[in-house]
Image (cartoon, helix red, strand yellow):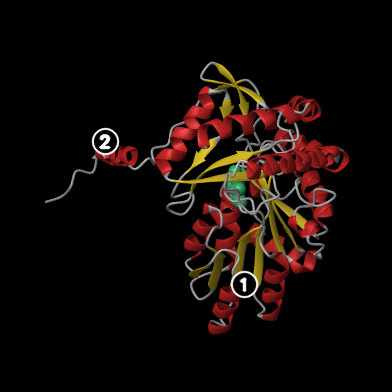
Amino acid sequence: MSSDFYDFADQLTRLNQQGLYRRRRVTDGPQGILVRVDGKQVINFCSNDYLGLANHPEVAAGFKQAVDRYGVGSGSAHLICGHGSAHHALEEELAEFTGRDRALLFSTGYMANLGVISALVGRNDRVFEDRLNHASLLDGGLLSRARFMRFRHLDGKELQAHLLAHPERTLIVSDGVFSMDGDLADLPVLAALAQQHQAGLLIDDAHGFGVLGRNGGGIVEHFGLAPGDVPILMGTFGKAFGTFGAFVAGSDDLIEILIQKARSYVFTTALPAAIAEATRVSLRLMQTETWRRDKLRFLVARFRAGALQQGLQLMDSFTAIQPVLVGDSQLAVSISQSLLRQGFWVSAIRPPTVPAGTARLRVTFSAEHETQHVDALLDALCKVMT
Ligand SMILES: *Cc1c(COP(=O)(O)O)cnc(C)c1O
């Protein structure tokens, strides 16, 4: 007997019972520290707009001026007629910013990761990924059809054992800053292992660019590594850049191969030129308005000190991502709902985004937060969690 294909109601009921049901909330107005959600103003602690550039007047002005000049749609893929002077200029500036030969724009970070991994490895190769890598990196590994192995989070020893046991052509893949934990990859170890074993190394620094390093150069700058230590570097514009899209930076040959072979590059419409222009402004502000990184560091340190005093379970993170561990999915959801009623928007992160039993509140900070926002959140957390 065949089961009913359309038994969606049963599936939804099960998700709800497991505390895994996901719901969207409708915001109104621009991204910022104060947002309107379902008609009520709350303080936002769940955005990835770490530097507060998503509604920066200069970024917005860059976007509007570019619409006047280039219109809205890009018309086609980059390889047809969609690759404009704005895209090209952004690529050149990103290459310079990251100290690499070239950079290549992708329409989203998710697509960049799918495209890069599946372009660079195939059936007879291997992909080794940190267990906590972003879904797009894991999906890229699966899509590539390479032999896919995950190593324990940050466990260079296990990675080394895999590399020794499997001398085939291999790509090592890791988040720079882990998106749900806020901790960093051990980049010097990954770079050394990749070099010793002649493996490729792809680092996704979606949450590091703009946040880490004196100039916002991300995890590579943070560790003081050379461009050659991380030959394939990926970043996104939807987080600290405050815009939309993504890029991969590396050698001339790497970029040429991606242009030929990355299907999520070849077979998709180019970003609107206005997004590229707005991102150029963000890239400049990221480097000139260094106070944004200093302020973020200050706010994070204040939050951690207060949270530890209250006995909250934090993670090993000094980045803008400051998860508070809860464990149970239902409990994480109910705490998040209670915080929202008090005017604090903090998202509950549950499996399958994080491993079973590690549901958490993912608190994120922005350079636009003020000390009193942090203190008010700490008070509210104290009330609901202790
Ligand atoms: C957000 C994110 C992506 C996806 O980027 P989008 O541009 O939002 O598709 C990829 N990797 C990591 C680590 C991310 O946090």
Residue 47 locus on image (x, y percent): 62, 35
Left or right: 33 in relation to 285:
left
Tell me the residue at 58%/83% (across/down): 164
Q: Quadrant of residue 233?
A: bottom right
Frontmost of labels 2 and 1 is 1
Tell me the residue at 79%/57% (across/down): 222
Numbered disc 2: secondary structure: helix
The amino acid type found where label 1 is placed reads Gly
Label 1 near ligand 1 (CB < 8 Å):
no
The residue where tag 2 is placed is 9
The residue where tag 1 is placed is 156
User: 272 or 81, which lies in front?
Assistant: 272
Tell me the residue at 57%/23% (across/down): 343
Residue 342 locus on image (x, y percent): 55, 23
Residue sitting at the far left: 1
Q: Tell me the CA gap for discs 2 and 1.
A: 44 Å
Left or right: 374 in relation to 288:
left
Residue 123 in view (yes/no): yes
Residue sitting at the far top: 39
User: 238 or 81, which lies in front?
Assistant: 238
Sequence order check, earlier mark of 2 and 1: 2
Numbered disc 1: secondary structure: helix
Vertical comparison of 123 with 164: above or below: above
Label 2 Cα neighbours within 10 Å, binned few <14 / some 14-19 / many ≥20:
few
Q: Are marks 2 and 1 in contact (CB under 8 Å)?
A: no
User: 194 or 34, which lies in front?
Assistant: 34
Residue 300 locus on image (x, y percent): 72, 42
Vertical comparison of 223 with 111: above or below: below
Label 1 Cα neighbours within 10 Å, binned few <14 / some 14-19 / many ≥20:
some
Residue 270 in view (yes/no): no
Residue 204 locus on image (x, y percent): 65, 56
